[in-house]
Image (cartoon, grey):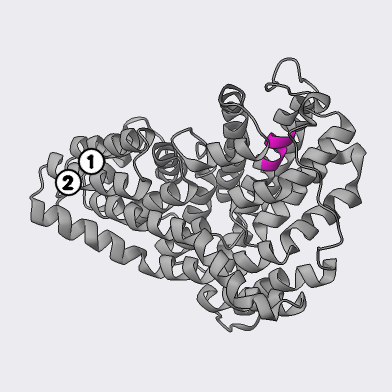
Amino acid sequence: MEPLFSTLGTTIGLVLAIALVMLRMQPAYALMVGALVGGLAGGGSLADTVTHAISGVQGMTPAILRILASGVLVGALIKTGSAERIARAIVDTLGRHFAVAAIAVATLVVCAVGVFIDISVITVAPVALAVARRANLSTAGILLAMIGGGKAGNIISPNPNTIATAEAFKVDLTSLMAANILPALAALAATILLAGWLAKRKEEVGVAGDSPAQNAGKMPAAPTDSKLPPLLAALVGPVVVVALLALRPIANVKIDPFLALPIGGIASILATGNLRNGYAFAEFGLSKVTGVAILLIGTGTVAGIVKVSALQGDMTSLLNALHLPAFLLAPVSSVLLTGATASTTAGATIAAQTFSPALAEAGVAALSSAAMVHAGATVLDSFPHGSFFHSTGGAVFMDMRARLRLIPFEAAIGLVSTLTAVAVYLVH
C-alpha cells in the first residue's frame, strides 16, 4: 500500500503535539491537533486525514474498554488500603539495612498488581519518606528507587501500556507480562545499585532541604496500620487477577482482562469488608483511569496517521542503511515515540500499532516484538512535558531542578530493561 502521508509532514505533526503539550494544552487535544496537522502537512486531504485519525481511534477501542474496566481494581487496591498494606509489609520485612531495595521492591509489587506507575509511587511515597528519615537517605535516592521499581513492575503488570501493546501485537496479555520478567529483574537490579548510590550522596544530588532533618516539617508522617486491611486480605484482589489470567496458559481457558480486572477488584472489596463502599471505590477507580482512556483516544488519532505514512518505511530503510537488524525497529521506535509523547502508554501504543506489520514481515515473533516495544517505552517516559515527571516529583516535595537531574538515571534503568529484552530475543 502506497503511504498517504509523508514522513516530514508526520514528523511536523508529532513535534507540534509535543510543543503543545509543553505549552500546557491538554495532551489528548494536543495529539489530535498534531494528527490533523501531520496529515495535512504530509500531503493528505482533509477527508483522508480525518478518516485515518478516526480509524486509529477505532483500533484503540478494545484497549480503552479494558482500561476502563481496570478502574474497579485500581479503586479497590487504593481505597481499601490494600496497595499501601502490601508496600508496608515489604518494607517492614526487608528492614532498614535494605531500605533502598525494600522501597524499590514495594513499588514494583504495587505497580505489578495493577496500580498505575505514578499512583504506585504516590502510594509508596509516605512509607518511603519515613524510612528515609530513619535511615538518613536522600530524597533523590528514594524517589529513584520508587521510579525504578515502578518501571520494573510496569512491564509485568496488567496496566494500560501492557494491555495496549498486547492488543496491538495480538498476543496474550499474560504471555507479554511473563516475557518481560527478566527485563524487569534487570531493571530492579539497576535501580537498587543506582538508587543506593544516590541515596548516600545528598550533597551532590540533593534537593532543596534534602536532609531528612530539614524536610521533616513538610514530609507527611508514615500512615498507621490501624486502618489498613490484613495482608492476606490485601493480596486477594491481585491473586484473583493473576489466577484468572493464568488460566489460558495453564488450562487453555481464556478470561479476558475486560473481566479478570474488575473481578479482581470486586474480590478485593469483598475480602477487605468494604462491600458497602464498593460503588464509591469503583467510581474513584474510574476517575483514575478516565484520563488514560482519553489520552489513548488522542494517541489513536496520531497512530492512525503514522500507520499509513511513510515514517514506518523510512525508519526501516534507515536501519537498513545503518546495517542494523530489522528487529531493532521495535525498541528504537518505542524509545523515540515514548520520548516524544512522555507517556509509556502513548509511546508504546503508537510504536506497536505502527510497526507491528513491518516487524512481522521481517520475521520477528509478535511476542518478542511486543516485549521489546514495551521495555523500550520505559527509557524516555519521564520527560517534563508529561505528567509522570511532575506527579512523582510532587510525591516527595522535590523541586524542578532536582527532578530534572534524575532523568538520566531513570533513562539508564529503562535502557537496562530494554537491552535485556533485546538479549532475551537474541538468545531465543
- The answer for how far apart the CA atoms under marks 1 and 2 are is 6 Å
Rendered view: 17 above or below 78 = above
Q: What residue is shown at x 51% (from left), y 66% (from top)? A: 286
What is the magenta segment's predominant secondary structure?
helix
User: Magenta residues?
Assistant: 142-146
State how many labels appear: 2
Rendered view: 42 above or below 254 = above
Q: Which of the two residues, 223 or 139, is positioned nearer the viewer here? A: 223
Is the residue marked by circle 1 packed among few (<14), some (14-19), or many (20+) residues within 10 Å?
Answer: many
Three-letter amino acid code of the residue under disc 2:
Gly
Query: Is residue 224 toward the left or the right of residue 324 in the image?
Result: right
Element type at marker 1? helix
Rendered view: 283 above or below 84 = below
**Residue 416 part of the magenta-drawn span:** no
Element type at marker 2? helix
Mark sitting on residue 39:
2
What residue does disc 1 label?
10
- The image position of residue 259, as x and y in percent, is 54, 79
